Amino acid sequence: MVSRKSSGFSKAQIVIFIMCVLVLERVLCPPKMGLETNMTTTRTNVVVTTNINAPSIDRVNGNNEDIPYSHHKSPLGIPQGKAINLPSVRIDETQDKQVNRKIYGGQGDKAHLGGFTDIDVNGLSPAVWKYLVTDWTVQSVIDVGCGRGISTSWFVTHGLRTECVEGSHDAIEKSMVPDKSILTEHDFSRGPWWPSSTFDVAWSVEFLEHVNLQFHFNYVSVFRKAAIILVTSSMWGGWHHVEVHPHEWWVQKYELYGFRYDDGLTQKLRDIARAESREFPVTGKREGSLGQHIYKTLKVFVNPVRSCVCIGKLVQQSAMGFWCS
């Protein structure tokens, strides 16, 4: 028999040739992922369905010019500029009567807003606030979900650079804050918002449970502007408490967002609030409800992107090992 030589390419050569073509195609014609377009389209749709006259949130306003969202490449970085706030969409008197708010404020707001009372002593702890100033040398605070601004007013009257963001128009109108220019009305279910300045501390008491999980990104953008995040979370029902979870759930969730939980700092502030409730300096008596949200559910998170920029003394106390140069 006469053997014939095989013609053509071997299988290995064919595979190598195909891989070279694919690599060349990727270099010459990089694929368009479409992520930025999809994000913009989604946000625009939200605005259109809620209020056709609302400003577009495709862009944020900062340094006297618009900054496209596409410029914010790092989801864990500090947002630049200042985002455009999107106030709550009001409902008429007939719709408002259908919302049974019971003891809670929010007249004229949609049902997911409001939830504040004239004064909720469970979320107040002057002893903790004083400790933040004297021992942590905190000089600036942003109050997220500030309601009528009880805690905000304390920060302002004690000389801290302060801002307050609240979704309820009714709460803004009834705010106790003396300087209304530091108030921002923004509904986080409509889109993200963040301030132009950075802060030592973000203070947020009885707020987390009110915002649905799919809107977390919208307010976490505010927390990224702070070095330390102090938050509480409800363990029981309440007005529009849609995210009620155990302590561990919040810790895991926020660490996934890039923050670091510090149990030592958490327990320290809880102990201060608990001691204050046992013997309130004003009355000299036990006031069990004073600061209850704080001594039961407060959580302290360190933002590693911001922490070494401002509060050296606090960072050195932290067990997380964030040291300022």
Image (cartoon, rainbow, N blue to C red):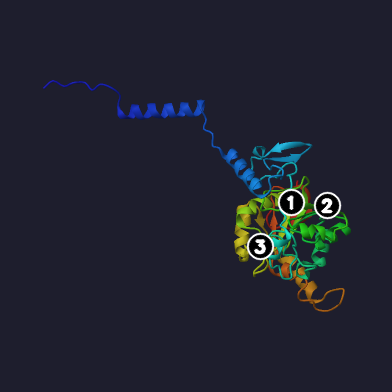
Query: Which element is circle 1 on?
Result: loop
Between residue 306 and residue 220, name the one nearer to us.
220
| Comparing labels 2 and 1, the label whose residue is closer to the camera | 1
Q: Earlier in the sequence, mark 3 or mark 2?
A: 2
Q: Which residue is mark 1?
A: 87
- Pointer 3 and pointer 1: residues touching (CB < 8 Å)? no
Q: Earlier in the sequence, mark 3 or mark 1?
A: 1
Image quadrant in which you'd find residue 141: bottom right
Q: Is residue 311 visible?
A: no
Q: Which residue is mark 3?
A: 209
Q: Amino acid at mark 1?
A: Pro
Q: Is residue 6 above or below residue 101?
A: above
Between residue 11 and residue 184, name the one nearer to us.
184
Left or right: 258 with respect to 140? left
Q: Residue 189: give its label.
A: none
C-alpha gap between disc 2 and disc 1: 15 Å
C-alpha gap between disc 3 and disc 1: 20 Å
Left or right: 225 with respect to 178? left
Residue lying at the far bottom in this picture: please name it.
Answer: 285
Q: Amino acid at mark 2?
A: Ile
C-alpha gap between disc 3 and disc 2: 24 Å
Q: Amino acid at mark 3?
A: Glu
Q: Is residue 309 above or below residue 263?
A: above
Q: Which residue is mark 2?
A: 182
Q: Position of residue 145 (x, y in %)?
A: 74, 58
- Pointer 2 and pointer 1: residues touching (CB < 8 Å)? no
Q: Earlier in the sequence, mark 2 or mark 1?
A: 1
In percent of the image, x 64 and y 40: which residue is there? 73
Q: Position of residue 194 (x, y in %)?
A: 73, 48
